[in-house]
Structures are given as structure tokens and as C-alpha cells.
């Protein structure tokens, strides 16, 4: 509702302060547009994370990240900056491939012996003033604070996730150099750093990825308490510290298995391959991986497809469905 002030004989309307439904609607658009957050693979952009439990939760789609509309729009701004830098490089004579010439799709790489581990590069480029060799091209934007820190101390020190990401890419594409570009969000200054391939580091990342992907239970957590810096702002803090329950999907089901060829199979259906769509939808026979349930296991019946927990709680077809399990656990605690 508008407010009014009286100046002499003139009645003036004061527009509402800090009420912006149009802006809210813009933010909502970005949230709705980016509603699908479940990646089918373990991406290189995440693999530099120190907490392997966080990586397990992400790969198994245990919880949706809480990205507000403003953040979603910020991610879109980063994509625009990437396209702008690629055009800048082409304008000065650098050859940049940001798409596969034969398919038109973004350039992607993956582990040949573990296709669940993959990612897409911003580009592959040649013709820089610093070197005529082919490079992985990676473009990021950063606040003034982090931009200046990267300039002073380097990507490895300030943004180890970015460093791990490009090491992964160099191993897949068999290149030994990355041309890393960062743009200052506040001043539009551009900084570049050339990063060399570290074979041992990259191979350790591949080993780490396999450990996360083929683990049938959450791995060790990094923080020693929920107030630890690494845990405080984590999307999975509730699962780790407050006995929250994972979202039901094939990825959180005790019957599903990630196979070495990059597929997922269902043990309830004679190890039939399940599509990405089916994985997201789940089915009526879903039962949680026991380590994802904050209760002690009492027994199980593989033939019936059920697991029994303390307090007489049975998860499985004909008993408590996975979608209702969290509600049932909370009900029992209240009682």
C-alpha cells in the first residue's frame, strides 16, 4: 500500500520501500529454470573437495542444494563472462574450440575405466602469446577480494577446487598446460595464469573419484563438529549432524549399483540397467542404504526387500515406504 505525505496543498505518494515483487519474480524464474540439480556423474568441478562424504552425498543425490534465485542468476552471469572471454581471445587471434566440431556439443572428458567420473571444459585453445602449445582453457569470475588473492598467491593456494578441476581435464585430454583466466567482477580486470600438468596429483584425483563412486556407504566426514568451518555452510550438514534422511531415488537405494561401464543396475530386477530418468524417479521397492538411515539395523530380508531398524521400523514394500520413513522416525521420537 502506498504511503502519503502532505506538502502545502500537494498530496504526494511515497513509493513502497524494499518491496520488490518484480525482482522476486525474476529470482523465482531462475530457481524454476534450474530446478534439475542432479548430475548423472561425479564432476571435475567438485572433485577437489576435501570432504569425501560430501562427494558421496552429491553423487548419490542425497540432498538438493539450496540455491536461491540470486545465486542462480550469478551462475548464469559466469556463463556470460565465459563466452565474452572466449570471444576476446578469438578477436586477438587465439584459436579456441569450445564445442566438438562434429557434434556441436560442449567438449567433455571422462575416465575410460570409470565413466561415472566426467566433466566438460570451457575450451581447448592454441596461439597464446605466452606459448604456442595447446592448452585447456578455463574461465572464472571472482570478487575483488579473491581476484587479488589469486593474482598474488595463485590458483592452487586460493582456489584448490579450480586447480583440481583443470588437472582432471588435462589428464583426460592428454594436455600438459591450462590457460586459466579470471575476471574481476568489480573492476572487469582480467588476470591469467598458466598451470602445468601434475601427473601424480591428477592420478590421485582419479583414485579418489573411484573410491567415492564405488563406495556403498557414506565416507568419512571432514569436520569434527557441526560448527567446524567446513561443515557450517555445507548443504549436507543436516544429514551429517542432525540425523536427516536422504532423498529417495535409485542412487540412495540399497538395491542399486554403479557399474564400471558407467551404468547403474538394479539388484531387484536381475541387475537390469536403469536409465537416468528411472534413477531420478525411483520405484515402490526403494529401500535406503542402511548407512543413510540414522537408526540401528536390527535385521533384513533380502528376498522380501526389507530392512528392519530399532523400534520396529521396517523399510520396504508392504511396510514403511522410503518417502514416509523420515516422517515415521520423527513420529516415533516424539512419542
Image (tube, grey):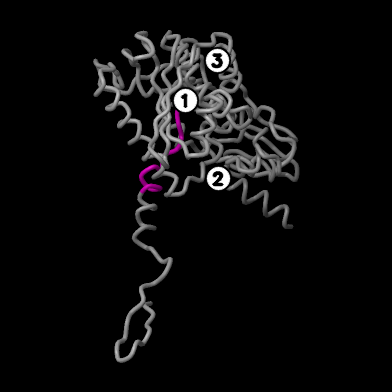
Q: Is residue 300 above or below residue 319?
A: above
Which mark is nearer the camera, 3 or 2? Answer: 3
For the residues labelled 3 and 2, the Cα–Cα distance comes to 34 Å
The mark lying in front, picked from 1 and 2, is: 1
Q: How many marks?
A: 3
> On the image, numbered disc 1 is attached to which residue?
41
Does the magenta-highlighted stretch encompass residue 271?
A: no
Separation of residues labelled 1 and 2 (CA atoms): 24 Å
> Which residue carries the number 2 mark?
323
Residue under the image location 70 percent in, 42 percent down: 241
The picture places residue 211, in percent across and down from the top left corner, at 61, 19
**Which stretch did the figure color magenta?**
30-41
Residue that mark 3 sits on? 206
Q: Nearer the viewer, mark 3 or mark 1?
A: 3
Mark 1 touches mark 2? (CB < 8 Å)? no
Which part of the image, by quadrant, shows the N terminus?
bottom left
Which residue sits at x=39%, y=72%?
16
Please tell me which residue is depicted at 41% across the width and 33% down the height of the picture. Answer: 183
Looking at marks 3 and 1 on the same chain, the residue that comes earlier in the sequence is marked by: 1
Amino acid at each position: 500500500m502506498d504511503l502519503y505525505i502532505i506538502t502545502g496543498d500537494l498530496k504526494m505518494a511515497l513509493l513502497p520501500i524494499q518491496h520488490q515483487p518484480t525482482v522476486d519474480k525474476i529470482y523465482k524464474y531462475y530457481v524454476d529454470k534450474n530446478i534439475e540439480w542432479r548430475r548423472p556423474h561425479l564432476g571435475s568441478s567438485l572433485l577437489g573437495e576435501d570432504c569425501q562424504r560430501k562427494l558421496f552425498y552429491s553423487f548419490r543425490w542425497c540432498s538438493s542444494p539450496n540455491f536461491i534465485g540470486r545465486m542462480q542468476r550469478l551462475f548464469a552471469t559466469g556463463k556470460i563472462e565465459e563466452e565474452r572471454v572466449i570471444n576476446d581471445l578469438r578477436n586477438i587471434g587465439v584459436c579456441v574450440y569450445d564445442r566438438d566440431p562434429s557434434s556441436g556439443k560442449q567438449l567433455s572428458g571422462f575416465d575410460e575405466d570409470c565413466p561415472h567420473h566426467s566433466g566438460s571444459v570451457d575450451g581447448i585453445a592454441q596461439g597464446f602469446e605466452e606459448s604456442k602449445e595447446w592448452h585447456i582453457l578455463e574461465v572464472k569470475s571472482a570478487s575483488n577480494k579473491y581476484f587479488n588473492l589469486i593474482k598474488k598467491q595463485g590458483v592452487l593456494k586460493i582456489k584448490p577446487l579450480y586447480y583440481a578441476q583443470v588437472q582432471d581435464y588435462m589428464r583426460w585430454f592428454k594436455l600438459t598446460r591450462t590457460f586459466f583466466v579470471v575476471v574481476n567482477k568489480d573492476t572487469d580486470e582480467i588476470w591469467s595464469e598458466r598451470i602445468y600438468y601434475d601427473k601424480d596429483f591428477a592420478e590421485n584425483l582419479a583414485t579418489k573419484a573411484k573410491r567415492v563412486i564405488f563406495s556403498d556407504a557414506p565416507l568419512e566426514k571432514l569436520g569434527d563438529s557441526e560448527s567446524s568451518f567446513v561443515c557450517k555452510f555445507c548443504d549436507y550438514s543436516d544429514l551429517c549432524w542432525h540425523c536427516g534422511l536422504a532423498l529417495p531415488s535409485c542412487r540412495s537405494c540399497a538395491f542399486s549399483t554403479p557399474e564400471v561401464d558407467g551404468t547403474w543396475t538394479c539388484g531387484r530386477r536381475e541387475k537390469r540397467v536403469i536409465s537416468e530418468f528411472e534413477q531420478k524417479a525411483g520405484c515402490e521397492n526403494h529401500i535406503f542404504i542402511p548407512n543413510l538411515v540414522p537408526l540401528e539395523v536390527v535385521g533384513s530380508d533380502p528376498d522380501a526387500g526389507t530392512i528392519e531398524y530399532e523400534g520396529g521400523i521396517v523399510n520396504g514394500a508392504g511396510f514403511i515406504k522410503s518417502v514416509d520413513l523420515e516422517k515415521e522416525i520423527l513420529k516415533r521420537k516424539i512419542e
